[in-house]
Amino acid sequence: MGRKLDPTKKQKRGPGRKARKQRGAEVELARFLPPGGLPPLPFSIRPRAAKRRLGAGSAPAGRRPFGGGREPASECWGRWGFPCPASGFTDGNSKLLAPAKAKKIPSKGNNLELSSDGEVEECNWEMEEDEDGSSDAMVDDYGASSSEEEELLPIEKAALKQKSKRGGLSEEDSEEEEEEMAENKSKQKKGQKEEESLDLQLNLDPEEEFKLPSDEQMEKENILFSCGICEPPPDLHIIHQRIKGNLEVLQDFTVKREEGRSRQEYLSVLRRDMAAYYSYSDFLLTKLMDIFPLPELVNFLEANEVPRPVTIRTNTLKTRRRDLAQALINRGVNLDPLGKWSKTGLVIYDSSVPIGATPEYLAGHYMLQGASSLLPVMALAPQEDERILDMCCAPGGKTSYIAQLMKNTGMILANDSNAERLRSVVGNLHRLGVTNTIVSNCDGRQFPKLCLCLQVLGGFDRVLLDAPCSGTGVISKDPAVKTNKDEKDILRCAHLQKELILNAIDSVNAASETGGYIVYCTCSITVEENEWVVDYALKKRNVRLVPTGLDFGKEGFTRFKQYCFHPSLKLTRRFYPHTHNMDGFFIAKFKKFSNAIPQAPKAATLSTLHDATVEPQSKKKKLGGSKAEKQQKLPQPALKKRHSSQAERRPVKA
């Protein structure tokens, strides 16, 4: 079936079309030539050979014009089609020094050359002739010129033509020209870079002075915003630049302010821009501007846009932090110790497994808990065999931490007014292995009256009150706080916190040998929910503030706007997300020194006023009393006679 293919008789095919077009293939021809043959010159040497024709006749003895050629000079010149100059060049053949012109011309003859495979290949190499018939340059049949003028600029080509007309060129002149060309190219590149840099500088707008929007623009925006026709401007980049410019002006207001503009106008524009850029309500942003300086306010707002790192607390009732860290690392968790201030905390950077579903979590080896919620328990510093009350315990992170520090000794009463949230408390306590806790569902405002423990045992040694608040310190977790809080919510929370803190103080036994401490904390940063409540408790109960025992954190306010608080409020601590990389928190620690409840100052003033009104009446009694009292002391008959005598004196009307 068919003819058999004999591989020994297979005819070799020549290179393809692309192989013939490749440059530099003739360099490989040397290995296919016989030992005594002359290899063809490469492309880079051919134009230089034309330039060195002048030095061929006057070359010193023993030196060949082509540097190592194996043929005499006459044969070599004839090989490449050039006339061999016997005694130097004259005016008749000076045209040989003219630069070659790269032009493609039709081929007139075929020259045979060896391909890279050793086969014969047709390659058309011809010389371009001028009008008088002299050949100037070599051009291949693909239009590629062998001269180096392709890399030259038009100005350099014109300079070469002028020099060629003036006279011949030597090797030294050609080298100097090449150096000059290289220098010119480098200078041109530097000039281009400088021009580009100048263009970039010109494209950048100069720092213009910040100017407030005109009154007409502000009125239009106010009308549109008040009617709800449009939303804040969509171009946030413009708003951000306006915020930065406004802050620069406010930092050096006397120098950079616009004439005729007050500071309140700048602040109103800044508040409006920040509310639009960060999506805050005008009320909450006004509160924050009162608390923070303007540069720090921007940092706080930016920190609220980034979530806080995930942290866990090691349950030392079941394991050690070192063992837990190693077990989680083996599961693909990237973690580090939380800080020098915590011996049980770990911060999680990333994890290949869900942190809330690992076998270690289900076994109760750790608790998912924020770094800021560890601080109140550290400030409380519970001791073993104490009676401790956690008035608002849900979801049970602080309660389990207290039991951990107490090593499951003593007694903990975990109370919360929300029965649904107590389910999570019970589940966490069982999972973590806590056995010294009693869970109750009572209203904290009536706790001292309802709790039998106070009546039987005589009160608690320590009380932790994590009061419900507006949540302005955890905006990164709940962004809805930006817009859904108003003045009524803040005041409602403050009133509830005042009631809770008074009942928490009443639940503590001041005569406790190891305790008598109350820790008040909130996850809010407003002054109404923190310093005001603490100052109210200092006035209403026999307590004083003591150091929290925390080495970091900012001091509480002793003066805020037009209000002055107790000087001991500097012992309280504030924590912010932009400075401590944790949720906003406030912590205050009280020491109760008397179980007696002091009388309110208002009641004392009323009693003094009552005494002041009673004293003149007593003096009148000593002097004999008033006329009415004298009449009452008279006997009844005398009164009758007197009345009858008065009636007799009256005239009788007809």
Image (spheres, rainbow, N blue to C red):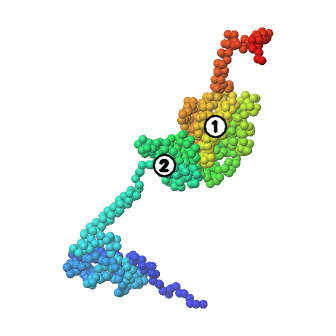
Q: Which mark is residue 179?
A: none
Please report the residue visible at 41 percent of the width from the left and 56 percent of the height from the top: 204
Residue 467, given in percent of the width and then of the height, sits at: 65, 38
Please report the residue visible at 48 percent of the width from the left and 45 percent of the height from the top: 266
Q: Nearer the viewer, residue 209 or 199?
A: 209
- Amino acid type at mark 1: Ala
Name the residue tied to disc 1: 494
Label 1 residue SS? helix
Q: Is residue 632 visible?
A: no
- Amino acid type at mark 2: Asp
Above or below, 329 against 553 in this view is below
Residue 609, given in percent of the width and then of the height, sits at: 64, 21
Q: Nearer the viewer, residue 320 or 478?
A: 478
Name the residue tied to disc 2: 215
Please report the residue visible at 29 percent of the width from the left and 83 percent of the height from the top: 129
Above or below, 455 against 218 in this view is above
